[in-house]
Amino acid sequence: MIRTRLLAAIWLGGFPGALAAQRVALLPDSVIAALAGELSGETAKRNLERIAGEHRMRGSRGFHRAAEQLVERLTAYGLSDARIESFPADGKRFYGTQRARRPWDADFAELWLLRKHGSGWERAERLASWDAMPISLAQDSERGQVTTALVDVGDGTREGDYAGKDVRGRLVLVSQQPGSVQRLAVERFGAAGIVSYAQNQRTAWWGEDENLVRWGHLGSFDTQPTFAFMISLKQARALRSRLLAGEEIRLDATVRAGQHEGGYEVVTATIPGADPVLRGEEIAFSCHLDHQRPGANDNASGCMAILEAARTLAKLISEGRLARPARTLRFVWPPEIEGTLVLLNARPELARRIKAAIHMDMVGGGPATKAIFHVTRGPASLPSFVYDVGAAFGALVNEESAAFAGTGTARFPLVSPEGGKEALQAVFADFTMGSDHEVYSEGSFRIPAIYLNDWPDRYIHTNFDTPANIDATKLERAAFIGAASGYYLASLRQDGVAALLPVIQRASLRRTATMLERRAGLMGGEEMHLTFFHFATERAIVGSIETFAPVMAVERNQATAFLERAEELASFGRTLVIPTGAGRPAYQRIAEVRGPMSVFGFDYLESRLGAEKVAALGLLRYAGLRGSGGEYAYEVLNLVDGRRTELQVRNAVSAIYGPVPLEIVVEYLSALESAGVIRRSDR
C-alpha cells in the first residue's frame, strides 16, 4: 500500500524535478560520442593477451614483467609519469592490517605418476607441470623432492580424515584447498606434500567440466612450509578409483620454488588535473594485476579495461577533443587487496587525495563464461552519490546496447568488430565483497568506489580462464562506463549539481521502493530501524555532493523537500523515534590500525586473538536475510565512528543485511577492542 502511495505521489507531481526529463545526461552527447568513438575493445584485448602469458604472483618475475609492459604502454599512450612503485615485503612488517607477504616464485615443478617396471618403478604419466601449466603448482609452495606413495584422506581438514592412515613421508590426496589441510597433514601427521583437487568458486557449472585445474594456495606464514600440486577432478577420480581398489599408487614430485627477498610492486600513472586547487584531488581507477596464468577475465580484463580508459582519456585530452578535467585522474595496478592496502597505508597523503575510485575486477567474460556484468554500489556504511554516477552510465550502456541489439541502430552501440553485439544487460547491485574496492571503502579510508565486475564466471581461477573467452565488446563497454564515470567525477563543479540532483532522486525513489518491499517482511520494531536508516542514508547521499562541489541553498532546499515528502509517505506520516542505546558504550577506530580484518593471506583479528577465539565469534558464523558473517563483520567495523552506541551499530547493520542479535554484535565489538582495533569513545 505504501509503495503504491509513493509511486502515485511521484506520478502526480509530489516530487518536483524528479521526473523532469526521461533521462538526465551527466555528460554532453559530444563527450559521450568522443569516448565511444575512441575506445577500442580490440586494443584492450591485444594488451590483455600480452599479460595473460605471465604468471603474475605478488613480487614475482612474472608480475614484474607484466608491470614493465604496462609502464611501456602507458608511456607510449602519453602518460609521462608512469612508473613502478616498490614497497618492502619481508614477512614481518605491517601495512595497516596487512602483514606483508614475501614475494614468491617458482623455477620448476613436476608431478609424475609411476608404474611398476621389473623390481622397480618408472615414470608413466606427467600429472602436473609448472612450465606447461603454472596453476598446477599451489601458490607459496616450497622446494621439495620425493618419490613416495599417495594416500587419499578425503577432505583432509579433520583429524578423523587421517584415522588409520599412515601419511608420514607420503603425499596426501585431498578435496580441499592445500592451505586448509597444511597444518594437519604436514605439521601434525608428517605428510611430505599435498595433491589437491579442490573445487573452489563453486557455481551452477562447477562440476560439468572435469578437466578444469583450479588455483590452489598454501599458507604464507606457516612454520613448516610444504608444496602442493593441483590436479583436475578427472585425474583425481581416476586416482581415487585405483586407491579404492587397493592398488598402490606411487608418485614422483619435484619442486623448486619458494618465497624470497623483495617487495610489492604497484604500477601507477596520472593525467594531471587542470584546476590549480582541485588538481590535488584525485579520481582513482583501480584493478589488480596479480593472478595465475592465464587469468584473462580475473583480472587481465580489468587491468586492460582501465589501461584502455587511460589511453582514450589521455588521447582525447591531448588532441583537445575533451577538456582537461579539474581533478587528477590516477590509474593504479597493484596486487589484489594487499597491494591496495599497502599503497594506501604507505602513502597516506595519496589516500587523502583520492575522492573516489572506479574498480574493475573481471569485466570481459564472453558467453562461454556464463558471466553477468554488474555495476555495484559501495557499502551502505559509506553513502555517496558516486555510486549513482556509475549506475547512470551503466544504464546508458544498457539502453544503447539494447537498442542496437534489437534494431541494429543506436547512437552509441559500443560494439567492437571482434566482439559480440548482444545487449549488455548490466545488473545494478548493492555492495558485495571480494576485491580491492572493499579496501578503498573501508572505514579507515572511506573512499567511495564504483565496482564493475562479472559474476558468475565458470572459469574463474582455472586453466580455462583464457583470452579466447574474453569478449572485446564487453571490454569496450566496461572501459566506457569507467572512463565516463571517472571523467565526470573529475570534472564536477558547482555548476553541475543541478543536473546531478535529478539523477540521485530517481535512484532514491528506486531504493525507497526496494526498502518498502524489504520492510514488508519485518516486525517488532525492525521495520522502523530499516526506515530510519534508509532515509538517513538518502540524506547522506545528497550531503556527499559537498565533498566535490558546493550545493546552493535553492538546490539544498529542493533536495530536502524531496526527501521529507518521501519519508512522510513511507513513515505513515509519523516521526520515527529510534532508541539510541543511551548508557551503552560507543567506540572509535584506533587510527594506526587501518584496513579490514581479513585481508589477503592474513587475518589480523586471528593474529591478535588466536584462531580458536575468532572461530567462536557468533557474528562471523551468522547468516542473515541478505548477508552472512564476513559481510556483517565488515560493516560493523565500518559503522564504528566514535558516536554510534553498540545498539545503534546493531540497528544499522540489521537494516543493511537483516536483523541480527545484539549480543553477538557486542561480542564482536569487544573482540575488536581486545585486539586493539577500536577503543571506547567519550563521545
Image: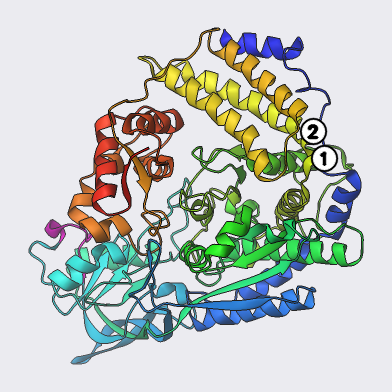
Residue drawn at point x = 81 percent, y = 51 percent: 414
- Work out whether residue 25 or residue 500 is closer to the camera in this orientation and state it: 500
Task: Give the residue type at disc 2.
Answer: Ala
Instruction: Say which mark, if any, is on residue 498.
Output: 2
Image side of residue 366 versus residue 204, left or right: right
Q: Position of residue 513 (x, y in %)?
A: 59, 21
Residue linked to disc 1: 495
Mark 2 is surrounded, within 10 Å at the Cα level, by few (under 14), some (14 to 19) or many (20 or more) other residues, namely some
Disc 1 is placed on an element classified as helix
Q: Quadrant of the C terminus?
A: top left
- Mark 2–mark 1 CB contact (< 8 Å): yes
Numbered circles on residues, count: 2
Disc 2 is placed on an element classified as helix
- Work out whether residue 89 or residue 193 is closer to the camera in this orientation and state it: 89
Say whether residue 657 is visible: yes
The picture quadrant where one finds residue 511 is top right
Say whether residue 241 is visible: no
Q: Position of residue 501 (x, y in %)?
A: 74, 31
**Residue extent of the magenta highlight:** 151-161
